[in-house]
Amino acid sequence: MAVNLYSRTDQRSAAQGGFTLIEIIIALIVITLITGMIASSFGPWAKYKAKVDTENQLASIQQALTTAYEDNAAAIDNVSTATITLPGGNIASTAVATSTTFQPLISYSSMSPAAMYRDGYSKPLTVFVSNQLTTTIDNTVLSYHVIAVVSSGQRMGAEKSTFDPNTGILTLDPSETGIVINGLNIQYALYQQTMTKLQNIAKLYSNYYESRYMNDPSRSYGIDYFANTNGGSGAVSSNTSWDQTGCVNNSVMGGSQNITNGCTASNPAGPAGSVAATGLESALGLSSDDVMDAWGNPIYVDNDSASVRSPDNPNAAMQIPPFTALIYANIVGGQTMAVSAAGTFN
């Protein structure tokens, strides 16, 4: 006969179910392993995200700084100190950026200054600004600044990267991430744009000279067709070797008086001696943008100083043809860019 070894109480407990101590221990071990796997996977992912966020943020700051520099290059590089001068304020070197560091960039970035100053690791950035630097290109001295922004990344402590404000050289530590805005690249681009404008105006001015010569019944080699006798503030040259009926005023005597002779622009506006004020803008069919340099300043004409050949030159040897004129721009640092226009005859 079979014997039932379980009591009614044992049968009732088995029927109710539950976890044994061994089962609970095994479950805890599994949970611990899974948690460890998740944590080990999340750590690298979080670091990678912080790295990508930092790179994207630095790229955004670089774009904002570049655009701000391009729009304010003249004001920025007229300052000799380690400062970036913008309409909304100044940006200077700082080891620990704050919520106000990038305030001057508020109109150049979609990011708020409060969000801009921390990297993807939520650590403040470091900003470096050089002193005013210079380099010579085609006998023209260009002034510029260098800006660098650095993130120390996940490493704790201050940045290890170094920056020389007297050379603008950033030595970036391999563990850190940084950007550089070299003002020389911006200034050189503006220089090239301005030179192109000067060359274009000079070429058109030479063509104007030739056209005036060809349309003059006398076609005299002794007449300077670059300007008429009209100066500024009522000044009029008594020298008859000027183009008496021309539409371009004499620059040295002011070049801002009303133009007569039936010319298109009777009241040219602009600083005395500028391409606009002398009537040259209208005579050559130029736009207001054509007669402004890339820094946003007026382009000038010199058709009657000691630097050009003209009937009123104080040096007798410079009073004879071929007559010349200069188209020039006053740029940062008191420098002058100039292109010569020569009177030609066909």
Image: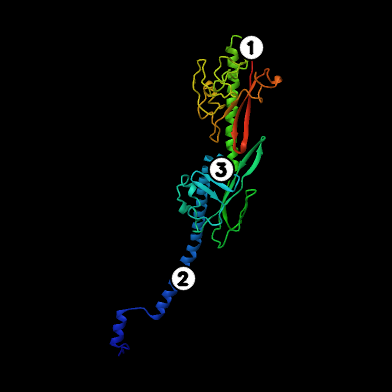
Question: What amino acid is found at the position of numbered circle 3 in the picture?
Answer: Ile
Residue at image coords 62%, 41%: 143
Separation of residues labelled 1 and 3 (CA atoms): 49 Å
Labels 1 & 3 near each other (Cβ < 8 A):
no
**Disc 3 from disc 2: Cα separation:** 59 Å
Residue 211, x across and y down, in percent: 58, 16
Whole-Å distance between the Cαs marked 2 and 1?
101 Å
Query: Does 7 appear above or below 275?
Result: below
Q: Which of marks 2 and 1 is in front?
A: 1
Estimate how packed mark 2 is, as few (under 14), some (14 to 19) or many (20 or more) residues with alpha carbons within 10 Å. Answer: few
Please state which of residues 207 and 143 is positioned toward the viewer in this rendering: 143
* Most distant residue in the front direction: 234
Given residues 197 and 31, the one toward you in this image is 197
- Kindly check if marks 3 and 2 are in contact, taking CB atoms under 8 A apart as contact: no
**Label ID, residue 147:** none
Whether residue 109 is situated above or below residue 293 in the rendered picture: below
Amino acid carrying label 2: it is: Leu
Residue at position x 59%, y 35% in the image = 331
Q: Mark 2 points at which residue?
A: 33
Q: Mark 3 points at which residue?
A: 76
Q: With respect to residue 218, does 148 lie above or below?
A: below
Residue 29 quadrant: bottom left
Which label lies toward us, 3 or 2?
3
Q: Is mark 2 on a helix, strand or loop?
A: helix
Residue, disc 1: 220
Whether residue 191 sits left or right of residue 266 in the image: it is right
